[in-house]
Image (cartoon, rainbow, N blue to C red):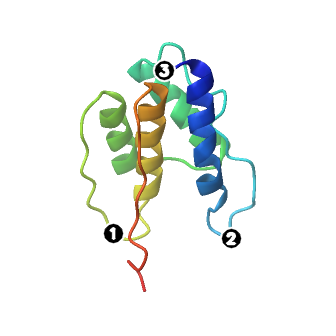
């Protein structure tokens, strides 16, 4: 997967990122152009954390630790309460996978909180 393919793949995440909480000011939350070359763990971490800070989000400790593990190539199982920021960790997993040219899927239960 070339860098143009990675940019296109990351652009697919943009609509998901645009749907943030209605209380948060709407701003463009694009990953396009953030993928470091080469996608080394430290560079991925710096790019992702920089992106979250641009969005006005500071990672909580459990998010930060999970993101570090993901970018280091480890699997992560995150068991935290509703509203604790699991989605940002999922976005980090997508960012890492797409930056490395891997395929990634996002699924969520439709009626989880109904």
User: Where 76 falls versus 95 (above or below)?
Assistant: below
User: Where 23 falls versus 2 (above or below)?
Assistant: below
| Precedes in sequence: disc 3 or disc 2 | 2
Q: Quadrant of residue 3?
A: top right
Image spot of residue 106 (x, y percent) = 43, 53
Q: Which residue is mark 3?
A: 43
Q: Mark 1 and mark 3 in contact (Cβ < 8 Å)? A: no
Q: CA distance from mark 2 to mark 1?
A: 20 Å
| Precedes in sequence: disc 3 or disc 1 | 3
Secondary element type, mark 3 = helix
Residue drawn at (46%, 29%), measured in percent from left and top? Answer: 45
Q: Classify residue 109 as left or right of residue 21.
A: left
Q: Classify residue 24 as left or right of residue 105.
A: right
Q: Which residue is mark 1?
A: 81
Residue drawn at (61%, 53%), measured in percent from left and top? Answer: 17
Q: CA distance from mark 3 to mark 1?
A: 29 Å
Q: Quadrant of residue 79?
A: bottom left
Image spot of residue 59 (x, y percent) = 47, 47
Image spot of residue 5 (x, y percent) = 58, 27
How packed is label 2: few (under 14 Cα within 10 Å), some, or many (20 or more)?
few
Q: Mark 2 and mark 3 in contact (Cβ < 8 Å)? A: no
Q: Work out whether residue 21 or residue 19 is closer to the camera in this orientation and state it.
A: 19
Q: Please identify the quadrant where the C terminus is shown.
A: bottom left
Image spot of residue 40 (x, y percent) = 42, 17
Q: Classify residue 51 as left or right of residue 84.
A: right
Q: Which residue is mark 2?
A: 23
Q: Work out whether residue 93 or residue 111 is closer to the camera in this orientation and state it.
A: 111
| Precedes in sequence: disc 2 or disc 1 | 2
Residue 110 tag number: none
């Amino acid at each position: 997967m070339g860098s143009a393919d990675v940019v296109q793949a990351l652009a697919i995440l943009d609509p998901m990122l645009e749907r943030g909480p209605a209380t948060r000011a709407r701003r463009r939350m694009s990953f396009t152009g953030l993928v470091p070359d080469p996608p080394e763990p430290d560079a991925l971490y710096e790019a992702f954390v920089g992106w979250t800070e641009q969005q006005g989000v500071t990672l909580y400790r459990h998010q930060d630790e999970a993101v570090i593990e993901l970018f280091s190539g480890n699997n992560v199982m995150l068991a935290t309460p509703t509203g604790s920021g699991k989605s940002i960790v999922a976005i980090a997993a997508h960012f890492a996978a797409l930056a490395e040219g891997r395929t990634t899927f996002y699924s969520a239960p439709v009626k989880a909180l109904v």
